[in-house]
Amino acid sequence: MSALAVFLWGWLGLASIFTLVWAVQLKTRNAGIVDAVWAWTLGALGPWFALNSPAPDTLKWLLAIMPLVWGLRLGTYLWFRNHGKPEDGRYKQLRVEWGASANTRMFSFFQVQVVFSMLISLGMLVISQRIDEPAQWAVLLAVALWVVSIAGEYLADQQLAKFKANPANKGRVCRQGLWKYSRHPNYFFECLHWVAYLPLALGAPWGVLALLPPLVMAFLLMKMSGIPATEAQAARTRPEYAEYIRTTSPLIPWFPKS
């Protein structure tokens, strides 16, 4: 199967799954399930590309395992975080803003997520089409970046979950652990995860496309559905958040301002 066919079949698969999820949320009135599905399906594109790849076996295994583990870890965390709870405030706000057209606009919103998922997947697709082995240092660097990103995002998620589990912290801002140095350390490690694929694409045909995943992810988190929506919700519910914004780096961990 050609690279284009593999890519388009992957797109069709994601579009179909997101359409099903949209139909489910019509009944449940809870669009939050899309967060977990987004991570699971994007992670599953790695094994899909590896299965239809002419690359050496080592590269195939890396391509299958790295995004799949990332997607399973993040998707499962998001599922248990949201399952059985009221709809996330971000989606509630969208329904209010969209009014009578909320259902159709939510469908478009879900499909736009598919488009961004496919843009992010281009780095994996490029790697899947190389027929030579990357340099050993490139493989070691990719694995090291991947391990740091997975561990860092897991740690940030656990620190925030532990903070929220304490009833005394209701309405307060988490400044513990990594959250002291970044308002969104989980998002930082999310971007770093997609940087991990860059070394594997060095020297590959169209390898420059591997720059797209971290750039697209950073754009999504900094300008669209990540930080803007999350911080707008936080500002409405946590009086301390304005001061947190003033003193703390938005993404890249750094020492807080005095």
Image (spheres, rainbow, N blue to C red):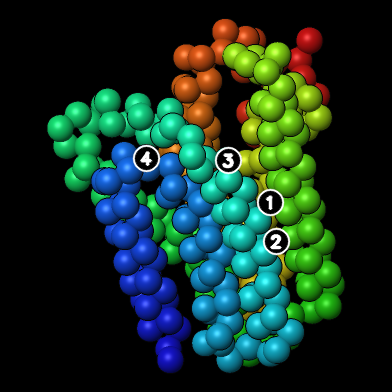
Mark drawn on residue 81: 3
Q: Are the residues flagged by discs 2 and 1 in contact, CB closer than 8 Å?
A: yes
Residue picked out by circle 2: 196
Q: How many labels does the image show?
A: 4
Mark-to-mark CA distance, 3 and 1: 23 Å
Three-letter amino acid code at the position of disc 4: Asn
Q: Where is residue 203 shown, x and y percent of the image?
A: 66, 77
Mark-to-mark CA distance, 3 and 4: 13 Å
- The 10 Å Cα crowd at callout 1, few under 14, some 14 to 19, many 20 or more, is many
Residue 74 visible, this orientation: yes
Q: Is mark 4 on a helix, strand or loop?
A: loop
Mark drawn on residue 30: 4
Q: Where is residue 258 shown, x and y percent of the image?
A: 78, 10
Sequence-wise first label, 2 or 3: 3
Sequence-wise first label, 1 or 4: 4
Residue picked out by circle 1: 192
Mark-to-mark CA distance, 1 and 4: 30 Å
Sequence-wise first label, 3 or 1: 3
Three-letter amino acid code at the position of disc 3: Arg
